[in-house]
Amino acid sequence: MRTPIGAFIFIAIAFLMDTYIFQAIKTVSQSASPKTRTIIYVIYWSLSVLAIVSFLIFVFTDHNFLGKKIRTYLFATAIGLFLAKMVAIVFLLVDDVRRGIQWFAGKVFFNNPEVNDMASDGISRSAFLSWLGLAAGGTLFGSFVYGFGNKYNYQLKRVKLAFDNLPASFKGFKIIHISDIHSGSFTDKKAVLKGVEKILKENADIILFTGDIVNDRAGEMDDYKDVFNRLKAPMGVYSTLGNHDYGDYVHWPYKGISKEQNLEMVKQVHADIGWRLLMNEHVVLQKGDDTIALLGIENWSSKARFPKHGRMDLAYAGTEKYPFKILMSHDPSHWDAQVRPQYADVDLMLSGHTHGMQFGVDIPGFKWSPVQYMYKQWDGLYEEGKQKLYVNPGYGFIGYPGRVGILPEITVIELV
């Protein structure tokens, strides 16, 4: 939305929302003293103006203005307030519609437009639903603010996966699975390093990364190469590309670099930190006398807005003879769309991409996030027949600099 028209449309919508919600503010503050009401009104409109100004700063400036960290938080605050107001408006609209129907029915059928909650100047909003709507919106915004502190709160998730056809030498094989680093969003190098140290303490046999090492530009990794090059494992560190790695969300050229050059630079980043980038190919992993195949493809999504560069036919060719296969593919929609129907002997697929939308609920027995309405498989383990898919909700973050409920994850997978 880096165009004046798009920005002004957003501002116009935000102002209409602010005006509408202000009526609820007036309703719930009727019993307060004039001085208290004035304070409430000033605070409300100050926050609204701050949100709009923050949005404008983000849209019409770059990282050189105020710095990346401040700009990111300003944008997150503006969007958080916007979403919180949307939630509040749902409650307020429900009550307004109810009152409208009640008023209309009274006027048409009973010749009596007066209703219990009528004010002298028209249909008023019930104080109860006004309070409820404002409380719901305030709770949502509060959760967004709370989530700022969770973006580096790396969680170790331990998963044991059983396969009947797993070669004997690979029983107990430990895999670290991470995804979606999004280095362009990081602002705390020490915090990122703590996550890397957690990975190293696991002493895994192999480390697998399933895409989106940057937000857009290869240079975003410059300050973090000396962090991620510490990742080592006896059988190596392997990686793939995600949708963000192709630079599709930037107007190129950027600082004299073309989109094609940037992609080659992103590939070089993997080599610079010692990771083996798999580009529609496979490698053979050997342990004892047994071998398995590790496949890695470029981004392949069944969603129209994301790229389809992956070539399973190239990565799969020659793996037929191996009894067990692991596939790294960034987008989990690939599993149902191509892997399961066409490659039934791919035993385990590892993905990322969704981030769990960085917002949701993940407690024993219950898991929910808005992203599940877009992706059938969005976080954790999924099984169909003998095939398994694990979706990592991401090591990093993008857009919103925080996480609520769905925390950054380091997945420790043990094959049994």
Image (tube, helix red, strand yellow):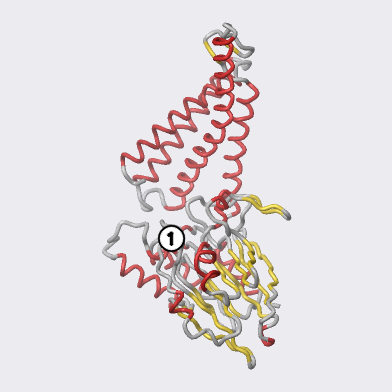
**Most foreground residue, 273 or 330:** 330
Question: Residue 374: horizontal and vertical position, in percent?
Answer: 52, 52
Question: Residue 92: horizontal and vertical position, in percent?
Answer: 56, 27
Could you tell me which residue is drawn at 66 percent across and 82 percent down?
Answer: 166
**Most foreground residue, 314 or 197:** 314
Mark 1, Cα crowd under 10 Å, few <14 / some 14-19 / many 20+, is many
Could you tell me which residue is drawn at 35 percent across and 41 percent down?
Answer: 6
154 w.r.t. 295: above or below: above
Question: Residue 319: horizontal and vertical position, in percent?
Answer: 52, 84
Q: Residue furthest bottom?
A: 289
- The answer to which image quadrant residue 5 occupies is top left
Q: Residue furthest top?
A: 111
- The answer to which image quadrant residue 111 occupies is top right
With 99 as the anchor, is 5 left or right in this view?
Answer: left
Question: Residue 24: horizontal and vertical position, in percent?
Answer: 56, 23
With 340 as the anchor, is 299 left or right in this view?
Answer: left
Tally of numbered tags: 1
**Most foreground residue, 378 or 19:** 378
Name the amino acid, label 1.
Asn
Q: Residue furthest right?
A: 364
- The answer to which image quadrant residue 175 occupies is bottom right
74 w.r.t. 381: above or below: above
242 w.r.t. 280: above or below: above
In the rendered image, which quarter contains the C terminus? bottom right
Identify the secondary structure beneath mark 1: loop
With 331 as the anchor, is 131 left or right in this view?
Answer: right
Q: Which residue is label 1 attached to?
A: 215
